[in-house]
């Protein structure tokens, strides 16, 4: 049997979903997470915010 591996990198997925569900967030820098950023929108990434960053630092 041949194994198949699928790797999907969903960059900014959770932030994109939030912007899709709430149109008022579109085009704004947002981050999703608790104490640590789980996902940052592309607008937030332009300010240097990235996944794994603490909320305080973001």
Image (tube, rainbow, N blue to C red):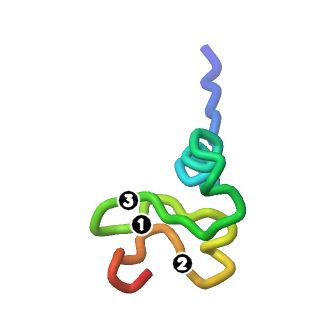
* Mark 2 and mark 3: Cα distance apart in space: 12 Å
Residue 35 shown left or right of residue 10 in the figure: left
- Asked whether the beta carbons under mark 1 and mark 2 sit within 8 Å of each other, the answer is yes
Q: In which quarter of the image is residue 11?
A: bottom right
Identify the element where label 3 is drawn. strand
Residue 33 shown left or right of residue 30 in the figure: left
Residue 36 shown left or right of residue 7 in the figure: left
* Mark 1 and mark 2: Cα distance apart in space: 8 Å
Depth check, front residue: 24 or 57: 24
Q: Residue furthest top?
A: 1
In this rendering, does residue 10 appear at all?
no
Q: Mark 2 points at which residue?
A: 49
In this rendering, does residue 17 appear at all?
yes
The percent position of residue 45, horizontal first and vertical second, equals: 63, 74
The residue shown at (64%, 34%) is 6
Tag on residue 53? none
Q: Mark 3 points at which residue?
A: 33
The residue shown at (56%, 54%) is 15
The residue shown at (35%, 75%) is 55
Q: Is residue 6 above or below residue 13?
A: above
Q: Neighbour class for label 1 at 10 Å: few (<14), some, many (≥20)?
A: many
Q: In this view, does 58 lie above or below 6?
A: below
Identify the element where label 2 is drawn. loop
* Mark 1 and mark 3: Cα distance apart in space: 5 Å
- Asked whether the beta carbons under mark 1 and mark 3 sit within 8 Å of each other, the answer is yes
The percent position of residue 28, horizontal first and vertical second, equals: 64, 67
The percent position of residue 56, horizontal first and vertical second, equals: 33, 82
């Amino acid at each position: 049997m041949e194994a198949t591996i699928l790797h999907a990198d969903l960059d900014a997925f959770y932030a994109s979903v939030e912007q899709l569900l709430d149109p008022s967030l579109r085009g704004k820098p947002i981050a999703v997470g608790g104490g640590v950023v789980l996902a940052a929108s592309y607008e937030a990434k332009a300010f240097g915010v990235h996944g794994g960053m603490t909320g305080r630092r973001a």
